[in-house]
Amino acid sequence: MRYAEKGFNLEVDLTRGSIERVATDPRETELYLGGLGTNAKILWDRVPPEVEAFSPDNLLIFAAGLLCGTPAPGCNRTIVSTISPQTKLMAFSMMGGFWAPELKFAGYDKVIFRGKSPNLVYLWIDNDKVEIRDASHLQGKGAIETAELIRQELNEARAQVAAIGLAGENRVYFASIEQGHSSASRGGIGAVMGDKGLKAIAVRGTGDINIARPDEFIELCNEVLEYIKVREEKPIPGVMPILARLGSPQEMQIHDEKWHTESFMWGNSRHRRKDFWNEEIEKQWTKTMEKARKRLISCYNCSLKCAATLSIPGLKTYMMKCFSKLTYTMAAMSDLDFGLKIAQRATEYGVDAFSTPQVMAFALELYENGILTADDMPGLPASNEERFYWLLDRIVRREGIGNVLANGTYWAAKEIGKGAEEYAHNNIKKQEQLPLKLSMLNPIYFLMYATGEKINITQIEGQFPQMPFPTREEREDFVKDWFQVPDEKFKQYFLDWELRGEKSFPYYPTVQMCCDIVDWQEKMHYIDDALGMCAGLSSFPLKPPYHIHNYPKFISAGAGIEMDEAKLSQAAKRYRTLVRAVNTRRGMRRKDDKPPEDHWKKRFPELEKELLDTYYKFKGWNKEGIPTKESLHELGLDYVSKDFIQRGILTDKEDTPSKEASSEPEKQ
Amino acid sequence: MEEAVPVMAEKKKKIVKIIKVDLDKCNGCRACEVACSAFHSSPKYSSNNPARSRIRVIHDPLRDVYVPIRAGDYTPAECTGRHTYSINGKEYDECSFCGVSCPSRDIFKEPDSNLPLKCDMCESDPPLAEPMCVQWCLADALTYEEREEEVEEEEEKREEMEIGLESIADKYGLQKIMDAVARMSLSKKGPKT
């Protein structure tokens, strides 16, 4: 019997309209765990670098993590993996909600789509009965609206639906996949879904998930619940409110937005407003949020209330979580009322709330600077806020200038020319980032920004405090009950870390310490993404209930795979390296591993070089950031080095690259 | 203190178990369903499946309806008509508050056999401090209470047959019934060989 996982994937060929139920190899689970890990393996095996995002040969994989559907609290993530049209690299955006456990209960670990449907369709998975259904009547419908209509026509209120809106249908490079209050937004995976002619996937399951060692497993779950209670009663002192507690940043509950509004940039990631926040604004924004907010809500089997249902008079009810609260507000230099209203429309269209506001602010900056003209923007309204709605409508329909902007700032700037590239200034690997522009180089964040292949800082940071605490006393207090550290040395790193002086940025933590810290942070995210655990209970917050010490027990007792910390770390390293291998084969090199040029004012090129060199070595990569033959061998990934050598990415003798990127369309 | 003379039957103390539901606190996470189905699997916690849960969250996020209900009795019949309740401006179907396992919906039935499910307050040996759904509801939408109630022993529910038998004894006398029962059991067994 298979435990925790079901041992079956659905393979759907949308060109032929065929559906197969395929048994999976349990040995793959042991090596790559599940979720992101096994997704990476499938993409490596079946999607060669010549296959572009919008090719019928590109795969779109919806995976439930290994422990999804077990009673492990907060384990509910769907990991969607494909090739991104925007970055041309592997995209692995994820979503919480209710979809992944339902897929498990229906009897499957993954749904793998290939091909393209000639007409818009949706997939209906009702336990053993799986069918491709016509979706022509859903064309142009909003993502949330679509989910409602599908539940009605199936007469199944408990079906969980993941759907795209108009943006996905029109292959907008930052289109999302929406599911209730959750969405898989990054990397344009909604565009791939639209390209495949797939409007939605509805799933309903009533089967069991089996647990290998039940008493042990439920005890582990109970310990997690107890620790959640402890952490909720005792927020961490000395850090900003959104980092003091568990969950994703509690944006729907916390009204104090001083930190976001004064530390993050406004407009096209340009303007810092250091004295923005005041009592009057706090009063007004609190009122706006409290009036709109109907209820704080959660994902499957999680007590944290990270999301909210929002109802604004005259608009359809929708749901939101996290920093989407402020991205539109800040890009438009407006207020929360505007931000919540336009987010409703954007959610139905199905677009990424990080990229979209920046693309629009970028366009308006080009307009103000004469690079885009009135001819490019016929009918552009006079008011700033109306302009954002105007642009949003055109982008998701790919109308006029919207057709250019729909490819994101990097590709739009290339197409527009006339110096527009200078304005697409906040990208990593061609993708828009959180609007942050800071002063002093942070060596830890430098490495995370440069090498994180989820290309989103929130998906690699966590666990280690972002800043040193001012006094030694506070630091000692913090490390007292910090049992989550993989090694005691991390406590010392933190204890010695000062705001100023010798032991401060950029030379402390030392290069080696930075490598340790970043590796720990990244590893926990990768484990979460294979198990389907929410980062909000694990890799993102300080002192989380899931950590490297209890994860092996969860996997052993839940899935029946004998696991210890070393074996788990090795598995995480294996599929993390495989993700890099997929991207290496797609042309990603050292030159791509860099934060936006203007992210920090004070840069230290020599230190940065040393950081990258040392970290690459630490990870088992060569100077170009390519996994070496030796390290691949250690991880049991000889098939990767064989392929690298065949393609001339590695040479047989030494680990030096002999050829430049193969799929890079033009030099940067 | 003067002793009270029992006028009727003796009073007896009984524990009434109550799960209180606060609809405003429900966050719709369905942890109650997870915990319930895991507890009632056999062996305990060996599997989990919300479709087997004896508590279900009726929820409709866009209309802000969140109602955890426990499985109650079984009925072979559908309701002939239903109420719609309007509470604080929200509309609830009568089914939202009804725990009956009935033909009009698929909840509170074993998904394989279709047999009805009923909440047993997690009766077990040793007993749990609180039913599992309450323990796992960190949102505190579900809370547990035990209330001692004094009930007259006579009022304890008797079998339907016993009630009927008593009415016959009233009419014919107990002796006649006992004779009849003896004859009946003899004829059922047949003559001794």
Image: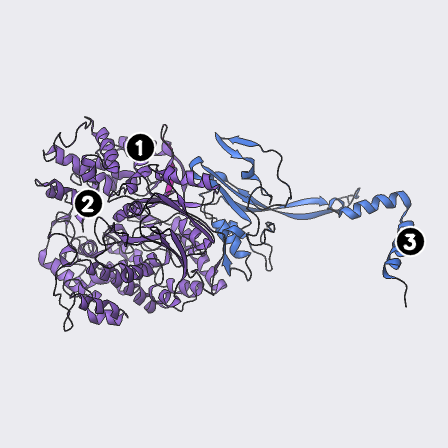
Chain colours: A purple, B blue
Q: Amino acid at mark 3?
A: Asp
Q: Above or below — where is A625 with respect to B178?
A: below
Image vertical order of residue A88 relative to residue A315, above or below: below
Q: Chain of mark 3?
A: B
Characterize the local packing of mark 2: few (<14), some (14-19) or many (20 or more) Cα atoms within 10 angstroms: some
Judging by the rendered image, the residue that carries numbered circle 2 is A436
Q: Is A420 placed left or right of B70 in the picture?
A: left
Q: Of the residues shown, which amino acid type is indicated by label 1? A: Lys
Question: Judging from the image, what secondary structure is the residue with disc 1 in?
Answer: helix
Rate crowding at label 1 as few (under 14), some (14 to 19) or many (20 or more) other CA atoms within 10 Å.
many
Quadrant in which residue A255 is drawn = top left
Query: A526 or A547, which lies in front?
Result: A526
Residue linked to disc 3: B179
Residue identifier under label 1:
A341
Tell me the CA gap for discs 3 and 2.
95 Å
Amino acid identity at mark 2: Leu
Q: Residues within 10 Å of mark 3 (few under 14, many from 20)?
A: few
**Which residues lie in the magenta part?**
A307-315
The one nearer the camera, B187 or A500, is: B187
Which label is found at residue A151? Answer: none
Using the image, determine if residue A591 lies above or below residue B147: below
3 and 1 marks on the same chain: no
Give how far across and how far down residue A436 sits, in percent.
19, 45
How far across and down, in percent of the image, does residue A366 sit? 13, 36
Task: Report the Cα–Cα distance between label 2 and label 1.
Answer: 24 Å
